[in-house]
Image (spheres, rainbow, N blue to C red):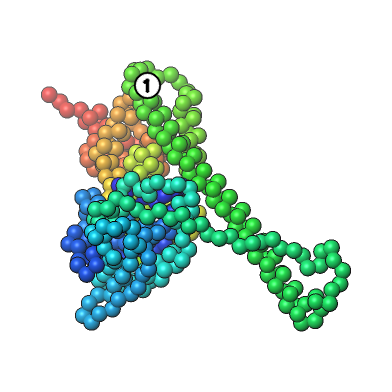
Amino acid sequence: MSSAGRPILLQQPEEEIEVSTATNIALYNEDSEISDYTDLAVTLTTIRLLLVPTADHHRQKPYFIELKCVKSVEKRNKLFSSPKIVIHLLNTTSSSSQPKFIMLSFRKGGRDELLNHLETQLKRKNWLVFDRMNRSSLSSSSSSLLTTTISNNNTTPAFSQQPQQPNMNIRNSTGGRGFETRSAGLSGIIQTVETQNKQTEQQLNEAFSDLNSLMDKAREMVDLAEKFAEKLKKNEQQHQRNSSSSSSGGGGMSDEDRETEEMNAVLMNLGLSSIVTKKSAGNMFHQQLARQLAEFLPAHLKKNQGIMALSDAFCLYNRARGTDLVSPDDMFKACSLFEQLRLPLVLNKFESGVIVIQSADSTNDKIAEKIVRLIEKEYEEQQCVSAVDVAHALKMSVILAQQQLLNAEEMGVLCRDESMEGIRFYLTSVCFPVQN
C-alpha cells in the first residue's frame, strides 16, 4: 500500500490494471465471519483480489488473493442476509487448515457488478503471463490471504499450464492456382468467406502482437522514469549538502542544476501508470481520486514551496491522465476529502477567493518567514518587495505570491505602500522600529 492508502500495482513483467472496487464488505472463512475484516474495500485487478481494511490501513495490513488460486465463484442469497460471493479455492495442500471456500458479504450492494468483473478476469487468465516470466512474488507490501490469515501453509499453487496457440498457417485460395470447381457455387462462396475470416483473424493477432510490443516499451519507460526519480533525489540531496557546506555561492547555474531541471521536465511529461476511473472505483471514486492526488501532487508541491493553486493542480493532474480527464467538480470533491481521509494535503480557501492545495507541513507562517529572509538578504537595499519579486524568488504564481504577502501583512510581519507604481511590502520592523 502507498502512503495515501492506494494499492501499489505491479508493472513488470506485465502491467497490473485496476478493474473494479467495492466497499463495506465483510470476509468469511467458509461460514464464519472474521472479526478483523468486517469493513473492507475490495479492489479487483487483472491478477489479484486485494482486501484493504478501510478503518485504518496504516495499522491493519492489507491482503490479497491471487486469481490463479480461485477454482470458481458463485453468488449466494439468503433471507435476512446480505448478498454474498462464494469463492471456491483450489486445493493446494493436504493440510486441513486451508479452507475450501471463503465468502465476501456486501453490506451496501455492489455484489453483482464485482462478480461480473471477477468472472471476466478468471476467464482471461492474465496471471499466466506472470507465471511464464517466473514471477516469484506478487507484492512486498501485502501478504497472501491464503497463506497468512486463513491458512498456515506457505505453499502457493504453481501453474505451468500454457495456452494453446491456434494454427495460423493460412493458404490463399487463389494464389498460385487455376480455377477449381470446388471454388465455384455456394460452397465456393462459403469457403471464400471462411478464408477471409481466417486472414482477418491473423491480421488482428499480428496487430495485437504489435500492441504488446508497444506495451513492453511503455513498461520500459516506467522503469526509466523510476530511475530518473531516484537519480533526481540523489542530486537534490547532494546539492543541499554542497550548498550547506559552502557559504558563498557562485553566479550562474551549475551542470548538476541543469541536469536536475532536465530530469524534472522529463518526469513532468510522464503520465500515471494506473489511473482512477468511475468505472473501476464505483462509489469510491472520489475517495480513490483523493488518494491518487495525494500520491501525485507532493512532488510538484515540493518544487512550489508546498503550495499550489487548485487550478494549476487540476491542469497538471489531467495532463498526467492523458485522454481520460476528470471534471473540475470531481477534482474539488476529491480534494475536499483530504482531511477526512487523513492525507498529507490540505485544501485551503483564502479570503480573496483563491483556492489552494498545501502540504500539511507547509503553513502560512513558514512562507512568511521565507519572505522576511528574502527581503533581508536579496532586497537589502530596497527593503521592500512586490508580488512579482516574491513569485520569481519562491517560484510560485503571482496570484499566490500576492496572497502570501497579504497573509504576512495580516500577521503583522509586513506593511504595504500603495503608489502609482503598485503595491510594495516593507518589513514592519523597519517601518516601525521598536524604541527602547
Residue wearing tag 1 = 242
Q: Where is residue 294 in the image (x, y as percent from the top left)?
A: 34, 49
Q: Residue furthest front?
A: 94
Total residue callouts = 1
Q: Residue furthest right?
A: 178
Q: Where is residue 326 in the image (x, y as percent from the top left)?
A: 43, 59
> Depth check: 267 or 421 in front?
267
Q: Position of residue 258 (x, y in %)?
A: 49, 29
Q: Is residue 321 visible?
A: no
Quadrant, the C terminus: top left
Say left or right for 404 vs 260: left
In this view, 107 is above or below 417? below
Q: Residue furthest left?
A: 436
Please, what is the three-letter code of the amino acid marked with disc 1?
Answer: Asn
Q: Please give the name of the residue rendered at 43% of the width and 55% of the height, measured from the top-left corner.
A: 159
In this view, 38 is above or below 256? below
Q: Please give the name of the residue rendered at 23% of the width and 64% of the height, measured from the top-left corner.
A: 29
Q: Can residue 81 be seen in this view?
A: yes
Q: In which quarter of the image is residue 240?
A: top left
Q: Please give the name of the residue rendered at 39% of the width and 60% of the height, measured from the top-left corner.
A: 67
Say left or right for 340 vs 213: left
